[in-house]
Image: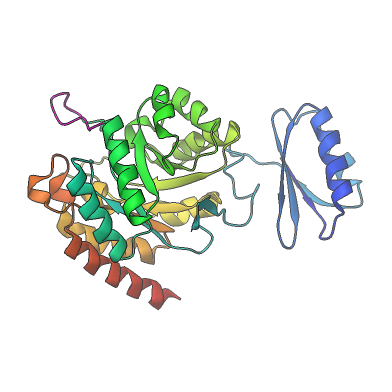
Amino acid sequence: MIAVLKNGTPKEKIESLSHYLTEQGVEVRVWEGKFQTVVGLIGDTSKIDDNALLGMDFVETVKHISEPFKSANRKFHPDDSEIRVGDHVVGGGTFTVIAGPCSVENEAQILEVAKAVKASGASFLRGGAFKPLTSPYDFQGLKADGIELLLEAKKETGLPIVTEIMNANHLPLFEDVDVIQVGARNMQNFELLKELGKTKKPILLKRGLANTLKELLMSAEYIMAGGNENVILCERGIRTFETYTRNTLDLSAVPMLKELSHLPVIVDPSHATGLARLVEPMALAAAAAGADGLMIEVHNDPQKALCDGPQSLTPAQFDQVMKKVNKVRAALQ
């Protein structure tokens, strides 16, 4: 349920209304835009009398929201959210590129890639320290040592770092990580999402490989319900009957998510296709579809990569993708 207030409503009236609604046993979220203020009610609103609200001279309309996701709903927050990460902003008209290797392998590798992607215009460095792979015999990541190497690369380049968490018990290791990634396999790890909701860290939430957009938004709701509204959604492809690509990239998810939610939406063409040669066309298509950014795997020597080499671009290939993406964005503007 939301109450849209008239433009210019004094703060004291907003505070008085919030206090009144809180006393009715609902959680109140206030969004103040340039032209209107929206008061969102979360919880059992059956005791709230619509007519009583409409009788207040500063209330313009009262609406009931049928979708189960509330905090992530654009009706609660009509403008695009801007997620601040240090000096960087994700969403709100900016275009963010996160690039780096699937997994951190050694110091020389991560430093070389970090310098290369920064030179090509990337805003963030990605790298897996913990790797949730299908086979228990595959490389599982350097874990805490991997995070230390990412922090070294950050110190060297200034790039904020993005890396994946697999277990809430690992949270102390992520204190200096700028953006915590929740991978596709953990999208519905609700206990982990609840713990991330208690932090103020930006969370990059990837869509599960067989999940609907509604389920993705409900997972975002778990984080936001805990008080952390710094959520970035990521479309990374879904599993279909197609076998020529690793997954099927659902680009329709970008405009649909932006219609349903105010949260930023980025696209990962690397995991979606599983093939380096398809990353460029899908990256261009994602930019054209209105994505707020891209997440691309880059490795200095993909043939020797310990993880996901076939889908990783070389630094030179990444540079070419960035130049073409910038042309697409310029054309759209």
User: In the rendered view, would you say 85 is above or below 52?
Assistant: below
Task: Report the front residue among 57 and 323.
Answer: 323
Residue 165 belongs to magenta span: no
Would you place residue 114 above or below residue 21 in this image? below
Is 95 situated above or below 74? Answer: below
Residue found at the very far left of the displayed protein: 303
Instruction: Tell whether 255 sits left or right of 49.
Output: left
Which residue is rendered at x = 22% and y = 69% of the image? Answer: 320
Q: Main secondary structure of the magenta part?
A: loop
Q: Which residue is at the front of the view, 97 or 58? A: 97
Residue 321 appears in the figure: yes
Question: Residue visible at 37% across and 30% down?
Answer: 186
Taking depth in this image into account, of 47 and 156 the one nearest to the observer is: 156
Image quarter of residue 293: bottom left
Tell me where residue 13 appears, x and y as whole percent: 88, 47
Give how far across and how far down residue 262 sits, in percent.
56, 51
Q: In the rendered image, which quarter is residue 315 located in?
A: bottom left
The stretch in magenta equals: 134-142
> Looking at the image, what colour scheme do you see?
rainbow
